[in-house]
Image (cartoon, rainbow, N blue to C red):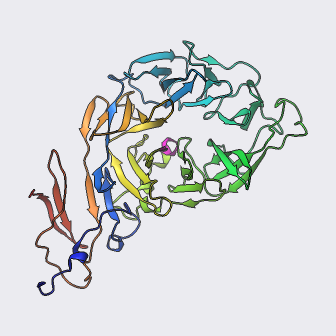
Amino acid sequence: MALRRQVPEDKAVYPDPRDGVNLRTSQDDLKPGEARKMQNLVYDGGTRSRTGSRRLTPNSLGNYAIKGGYRYYFGGPNPQSLRLVAYNTNVSVVDGTGTEFVKTTGMTANRDTFFTTWTITDKLYIGNDTDTLRSYDGNSNTFSTVVGTNIPVARTGVCPILDRLMCITTNGIERCNPRDPTVWSQNSSWATIRPQQPGFFTQLVPYTIRGLDTIYPGLIAFQPNAYYLITGSDFGADVTSVTPTTTEDSSIKLLDPAVGCSSPYGTTVVPGVGMFWFTTNLNVYWLPEGSLTGSYVGDKIQSVTTQLQGTESTNQAALSQVWMSYYYPFIMLGIPTGSDIYPSVQWWLDIRAFPQRVVWYGPMIGQTVGRVWTEMQNGDNAIFAGEGNSATGAWVYQLRVPLIFSDAVGGTDTDITRKYQTYFPDFGWPSRQKYLQEVNFDMYLPAGSATLNLYDLDETLATNIPIVSV
């Protein structure tokens, strides 16, 4: 027989946080399935710790931040690959044992560095907003400057579309001749693409438009507060000509004059789902695959109180350092907070629930990685990163390593700390005062200890209660 006035069992249960965190709603309005905080936690058949990282380089490469990282796949029928990192004036190959092979020391120091493979030439192209475009074929001992006509200084990396490359310069977006990266347009009246709003472009991302029975290759071009579609089937025969050929049909269209991206690292693409990016107004935007209009999906990680910090706390002086990366099953977002000029906090979007439910986990703290890249070809399946804090030094890490629950930060391994803050349940009786006699939950903790804090809406009930195993 049930005790009189006892809370029913189905009302007393704390549901699993299947809907992730919600920083925007007041604490007493959180719904069952939502959490206030999931620090270093994800829901995956249960609330679990995120996995950690391991250092690839056994020692620091120098007292610098890593400014670029990439896996270069090449070789056609004889596939090969190299992992490249950029720091200080160096671009180096780092092999699977963490051994460094310096390929050049001739880059301008400490510049954000971008790598792109163009399959037409089977070469790697390197831009850093200062040096003339470089290339590398994977077999030479050193990089070389691209030689030819109007070779650009690319503000970010080059971007392929159909039979040519495009890149952002101070004049706009320049293009090369068909299948020829040694001849480029330069401030051309027709071949240089210019924005419709004042300011520089910040990034180019390949984007395919799907018609009823046709696929149209294109690029999405970003400004801090706008995004555009560049498309066409013929981009001109000679980009140095005063006038275009009669068949040239490229165009740029302003898709949204208010939603843009300030970081050249702040976008990622999920096959079959679409493109995501971190907006200048500190939200996350989703452009569904094949669509030209999208929606905000980052509201839940924008806090409205000073007690918890979300994306609204991003250091806006370092917006160019925000990064996003997709490595199944999460889109990972890294942001610099406070006065940090490198990302120190991450938020993860669970793509398995998306778009039916927008499920974010975080904050993920303990890592200070500034460059993140995936390695997913030739049998690879891993995500790597470069240290963003120059005070720590130039280290390369592998992230999300199975069965590792510590973070490599420089030469130190730090245990991952986890904090889970539930919603405030009313137990089905919001107007009644409750007397909690015990709290029961299941936890697997192979090492260490855990404590429990209890809060009411207006006061702290108890803190640092040791959890006793039974």
Nearer the observer, 323 or 65: 323
Marks counted in the figure total 0
Task: Tell me, yes or no, if residue 131 can be seen here.
Answer: no
What quarter of the picture does the C terminus occupy? bottom left
- Quarter residue 24 falls in: bottom left
Query: Looking at the picture, does residue 70 appear above or below residue 420?
Result: above
Extreme-bottom residue of the structure: 4
Nearer the observer, 85 or 151: 85
Place of residue 57 in the rendered image (x, y in percent of width and height, measured from the top left): 36, 24
> In the displayed structure, does residue 404 sit left or right of residue 113?
left
Task: Tell me, yes or no, if residue 105 can be seen here.
Answer: yes
Place of residue 348 in the rendered image (x, y in percent of width and height, measured from the top left): 41, 51
> In the displayed structure, does residue 426 sit left or right of residue 387?
left
> In the displayed structure, does residue 376 sit left or right of residue 443?
right
**Residue appearing at x 13%, y 84% in the figure:** 2
> In the displayed structure, does residue 84 sit left or right of residue 193?
left
- Quarter residue 5 falls in: bottom left
Place of residue 430 in the rendered image (x, y in percent of width and height, measured from the top left): 27, 82
Query: Looking at the picture, does residue 352 appear above or below residue 460?
Result: above
Place of residue 108 in the rendered image (x, y in percent of width and height, measured from the top left): 55, 23
Query: Looking at the picture, does residue 225 appear above or below residue 76?
Result: below
**Residue appearing at x 48%, y 20% in the figure:** 92
**Residue appearing at x 74%, y 27% in the figure:** 179
Is 73 included in the stretch rendered in magenta? Answer: no
- The span shown in magenta is 318-326
